[in-house]
Amino acid sequence: MQIDIITVAPELLDSPFSHSIMKRAQEKGLLHVRCHNLRNWAINKHGQVDDYQYGGGAGMVMMCEPLSNAIEHLQQTTIYDEIIYMTPDGETFQQQMANQLSMQNNLLIICGHYKGIDQRIRDLYITKEISIGDYVLSGGELAAAVLVDAIGRLLPGVLNDETSALFDSFQDNLLAPPVYTRPVDFKGHKVPEILLSGHPVKIEDWRSDQSMKRTQEKRPDILKD
């Protein structure tokens, strides 16, 4: 999979993709992440990519020309399955969306900044608008990193144990059950006996029950949906 990201602050994305699972995914050739500095398509020598908004009001707006030129330049060599804009008013990102996007070949992500991007870019180019939650960040870079991480780990071969992703929270619309490792007894708190029993069917039943119980306690809204 190839993911291109257009941003005014590419340095913010250096660390998330240079360590751990995302680093290994790229080293294996399973994921290719390219960050493109929008200022390469600035309208003048000063690197301008934003301007005051029509109608007045606080905050700058990312201009049409730099974004349009950047998108069309990248489209010359890549056909994108989705052109995604990270925005607080987009569709809330959930596991099922990550599953769907992980099956695509090429994605282009636009990181907003300031007061956002000119609406005409959204009308002309954007095919999917995504929010990672009901709050506002300084820019779309951190949201883009969340999106890429959630998608990238699902690609076949990225995780050492491919089945582990299948049992993550939300994959079956339930939260994951509690997990334990050594020691068996930690400050008087012991690992549940069932996990030490060696009976796979009983262990799986226990985990299913715990997933349901945890979801009812922590996220009853999931069950309602």
Image (cartoon, rainbow, N blue to C red):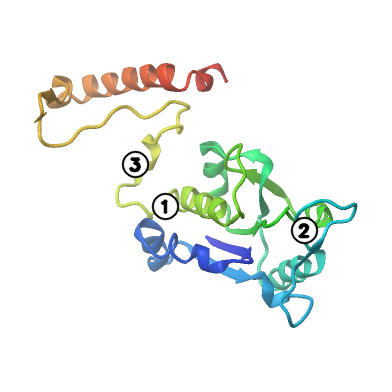
Q: Nearer the viewer, mark 3 or mark 2?
A: 2
Residue bearing mark 2: 61
Q: Which mark is residue 163?
A: 3
Element under disc 1: loop
Report the amino acid beneath label 2.
Val
Residue 40: x and y in percent read 68, 77
Residues at marks 1 and 2, CA–CA distance in whole angstroms: 39 Å
Report the amino acid beneath label 3.
Thr
> Which of the two residues, 50 or 83, is positioned nearer the viewer here?
50
Q: Which mark is residue 26?
A: none
Q: Residue at x 10, y 28 (%)?
A: 187
Residue 178 picture quarter: top left
> Which of the two residues, 188 or 174, is positioned nearer the viewer here?
188
Report the amino acid beneath label 1.
Pro
Q: Residue at x 47, y 22 (%)?
A: 219
Q: Is residue 166 left or right of residue 143?
A: left
Query: Do tag 3 and tag 2 residues touch (Cβ < 8 Å)?
Result: no
